[in-house]
Amino acid sequence: MSWWWAGAIGAAKQQSENGDAFRVHRSVALVIGVTGIVGNSLAEILPLSDTPGGPWKVYGVARRPRPNWNLDHPVEYIQCDISNTADTQAKLSKLTDVTHIFYVTWALRFTEAENIEANNLMFRNVLQAVIPNAP
Ligand SMILES: NC(=O)c1ccc[n+]([C@@H]2O[C@H](COP(=O)([O-])OP(=O)(O)OC[C@H]3O[C@@H](n4cnc5c(N)ncnc54)[C@H](OP(=O)(O)O)[C@@H]3O)[C@@H](O)[C@H]2O)c1
């Protein structure tokens, strides 16, 4: 058992013993790029009870279907392409409890001008879908 999973189980047990298993999370993360190097680490660490502000509720976004190796993470997985404005609006504007966005994704194009255009659109799509409905 990995150290983080042992911690997650311990946190859940402690919550249950304290009778607050169904409490509302104070910190709610939206991790954009949850299957990436940085995003996957966040998905492991944020739900732990000893993480600052935690345990966090975590939504995770990526384009691919949820991979098997990600199934153990206590994450609400959302398959969404944030470069697609309609897809982003449809899936992320439903979220009404996000307190923090962890934007850990990027797009690589052929020129710096294309990089700026693509990354600008992705970031704008997320903010326009999430911020109006955030607490
Ligand atoms: N890796 C590092 O050591 C490191 C260090 C410091 C800073 N950073 C920065 O952190 C950011 C992420 O880096 P990383 O190395 O973690 O990247 P990565 O491993 O390439 O992961 C990118 C993530 O974004 C998702 N993604 C890509 N395009 C998407 C789209 N259009 N819609 C939704 N999800 C999309 C990918 O999943 P899908 O392909 O399934 O969509 C994946 O989950 C970058 O800005 C990088 O510069 C990285």
Image: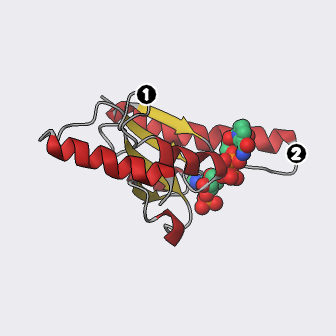
Dot 2 or dot 1: first in sequence order is: 1
Q: Residue 88, how many percent across, how many down?
A: 47, 50
Q: Quadrant of residue 73?
A: bottom left
Report the side of 9 relative to 37 (left or right): left
Residue 94 visible in rendering = no
The amino acid on which the numbered mark 2 sits, given as a three-letter code, is Thr
Q: Residue at x 53, y 43 (%)?
A: 42
Q: How many marks?
A: 2
Observer-nearest residue: 107 or 54? Answer: 54
Q: Residue 119, how many percent across, how many down?
A: 68, 41
- The Cα atoms of the two marked residues, 2 and 1, are separated by 39 Å
Q: Residue at x 63, y 42 (%)?
A: 121
Mark 2 surroundings within 10 Å by alpha-carbon count, few (fewer than 14), some (14 through 19), many (20 or more): few
| Residue found at the very far left of the displayed protein | 19
| Residue found at the very far bottom of the displayed protein | 68
Residue 117: which disc? Answer: none
The correct choice, above or below, for 31 with respect to 70 in the image is above
The correct choice, above or below, for 67 with respect to 107 in the image is below
Observer-nearest residue: 91 or 105? Answer: 105
Mark 1 surroundings within 10 Å by alpha-carbon count, few (fewer than 14), some (14 through 19), many (20 or more): few
Residue topped by disc 2: 111
The amino acid on which the numbered mark 1 sits, given as a three-letter code, is Pro
Q: Quadrant of the C terminus?
A: top left
Numbered disc in front, either 2 or 1: 1
Residue 35 visible in rendering = yes
Q: Residue at x 63, y 53 (%)?
A: 36
Observer-nearest residue: 91 or 3? Answer: 3
Q: Secondary structure at mark 1?
A: loop
Q: Residue 87, how many percent across, how many down?
A: 47, 56
Residue topped by disc 1: 52
| Residue found at the very far right of the displayed protein | 111
Report the side of 42 relative to 113 (left or right): left
